[in-house]
């Protein structure tokens, strides 16, 4: 009796789990089969959602007239303009979403409607990005999944699928070099080469569901979400007012093609300051002076590093000096950061403090080398005495041996 009941139970489960959509599409070919093949890896599938949750219809019936009946709410291809609200039926329902992910936000649709994409879609432009363009369709994955189009390492390429297409962007009169520029940037290097998933990508600066280009006057605040100290210094600098309508940080650092900052940006052939300041102007002289100060500290730190490394390689005890040297390097970093206040005295203070430390550590390294020389001299003198002693012993032994031979004869 028990095996019979178990059999009926399994049949009941099989019937309850029946999905004629997947069964049918799995037997088809090409584009009609693709959704069924992809859905197995979809996060919705893993949580028990089925085709009819988005497309309607009755997956329990093998009769196409029933399973794909309009009276059962069947929708074949969902119109692009309807996709955000379709996804929001679940993703705006906190009670439903929190069953699976309690921390999941439920305001994606509201954010999307404020975005450039959402506003254009509402105006009837169905060529703009919707949920499926960024998250895919039948193989949607969690953001943390490396295969997800919205995973930090893949998000730039996902945005570029539209924004790097000259044909797609032509009617919007928007440039298409953003991704190529970004791939030359220090942010991309940190993300792709350093595998730093917290490094800025498109969504970091533009937002995700509420994607909108930062306003020119808000660029410093956007950059400041990561570079807090720089923003604070810049906000008190004389450049804050001058750059307010020019893009602030972008003026010196660019936007998508942000390069690793260099001291050469202050003076010389690669100077950024010279684009606005003549070398004989107050600004030009200040830039040159700050460049000279930082260069002096950098040279001093390197000089101290060399002598400490040389001393250490000879086995001399310089561990305290090496630890102390980190203070000099920290002051060098702080001097470079202080540049964003664009005040010579702010840089000079850090440089002065750093030079004092680097001179101290260089002295420690020099003292260690002098100690090495003293030890070498002492060792040489000791060796001379040892050699003389050994020679004396040898001569004494020879005399004793000669005397013994003479007496025996």
Image (cartoon, rainbow, N blue to C red):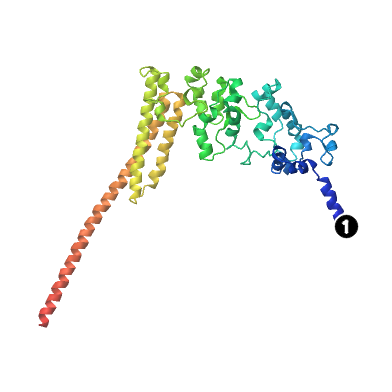
Looking at this view, is 296 or 274 the one in front? 274
Residue 355 visible in the picture: no
Label 1 crowd bin: few (<14), some (14–19), many (20+), radius 10 Å: few
- Image quadrant assignment for residue 322: top left
Q: Viewer-proximal residue, 175 or 152? A: 175
Residue 151 in view here: yes
Q: Tell whether 391 sits left or right of 6.
A: left
Vertical position of residue 192 compared to residue 220: above or below:
below
**Residue 60, position in %: x, y?**
83, 42
Q: Secondary structure at mark 1?
A: helix
Q: Quadrant of the C terminus?
A: bottom left
Q: Residue at x 50, y 17 (%)?
A: 241
In the displayed structure, 407 sits above or below 301; it is below
Quadrant of the image for the N terminus?
bottom right
Residue 263 x, y percent position in the rendering: 40, 29
Q: Quadrant of residue 107?
A: top right
Q: How far across and how far down the image is residue 104, in percent?
A: 70, 36
Residue at 81 percent of width and 45 percent of height = 18
* Residue marked by disc 1: 4
Give residue 190's position: percent from left, percent from top: 51, 37
- Check the image and name the residue furthest to the front: 29
**Residue plotted at (20% across, 60% down):** 385
Left or right, residue 259 beside residue 381:
right
Q: Residue at x 37, y 29 (%)?
A: 293
For residue 75, above or below residue 399: above
């Amino acid at each position: 009796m028990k095996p019979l009941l178990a059999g009926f139970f399994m049949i009941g489960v099989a019937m309850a789990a029946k999905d004629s959509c997947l069964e049918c599409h799995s037997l088809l070919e090409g584009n009609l089969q693709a959704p069924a093949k992809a859905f197995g890896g979809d996060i919705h599938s893993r949580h028990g959602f089925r085709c009819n949750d988005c497309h309607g219809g009755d997956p329990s019936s093998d009769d196409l007239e029933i399973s794909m009946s309009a009276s059962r709410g069947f929708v074949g291809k969902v119109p692009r303009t309807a996709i955000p609200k379709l996804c929001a039926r679940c993703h705006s329902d906190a009670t439903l979403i929190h069953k699976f992910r309690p921390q999941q936000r439920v305001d994606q649709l509201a954010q999307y409607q404020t975005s450039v994409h959402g506003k254009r879609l509402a105006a009837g432009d169905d060529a703009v990005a919707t949920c499926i363009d960024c998250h895919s369709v039948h193989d949607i994955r969690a953001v943390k999944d490396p295969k997800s189009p919205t995973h930090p390492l893949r998000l730039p390429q996902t945005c570029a699928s539209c924004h790097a297409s000259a044909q797609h962007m032509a009617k919007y009169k928007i440039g298409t070099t953003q991704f190529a520029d970004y791939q030359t940037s220090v942010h991309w290097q940190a993300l792709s080469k350093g595998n730093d998933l917290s490094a800025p990508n498109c969504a970091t600066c533009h937002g995700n569901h509420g994607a909108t280009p930062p306003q020119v006057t808000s660029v410093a605040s956007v950059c400041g979400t990561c570079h807090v100290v720089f923003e604070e210094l810049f906000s008190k600098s004389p450049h804050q007012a001058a750059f307010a309508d020019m893009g602030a940080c972008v003026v010196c650092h660019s936007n998508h093609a942000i390069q690793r900052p260099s001291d050469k940006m202050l003076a010389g052939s690669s100077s950024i300051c010279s684009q606005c300041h003549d070398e004989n102007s107050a600004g030009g002289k200040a830039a040159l002076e700050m460049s000279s100060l930082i260069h002096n500290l950098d040279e001093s730190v390197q000089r101290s590093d060399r002598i400490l490394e040389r001393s250490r390689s000879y086995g001399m005890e310089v561990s305290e000096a090496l630890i102390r040297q980190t203070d000099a390097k920290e002051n060098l970093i702080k001097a470079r950061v202080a540049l964003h206040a664009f005040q010579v005295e702010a840089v000079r203070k850090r440089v002065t403090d750093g030079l004092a430390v680097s001179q101290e550590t260089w002295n420690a390294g020099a003292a260690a080398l002098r100690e090495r020389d003293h030890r070498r001299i002492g060792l040489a003198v000791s060796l001379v005495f040892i050699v003389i002693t050994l020679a004396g012993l040898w001569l004494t032994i020879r005399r004793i041996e000669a005397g013994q031979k003479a007496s025996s004869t």
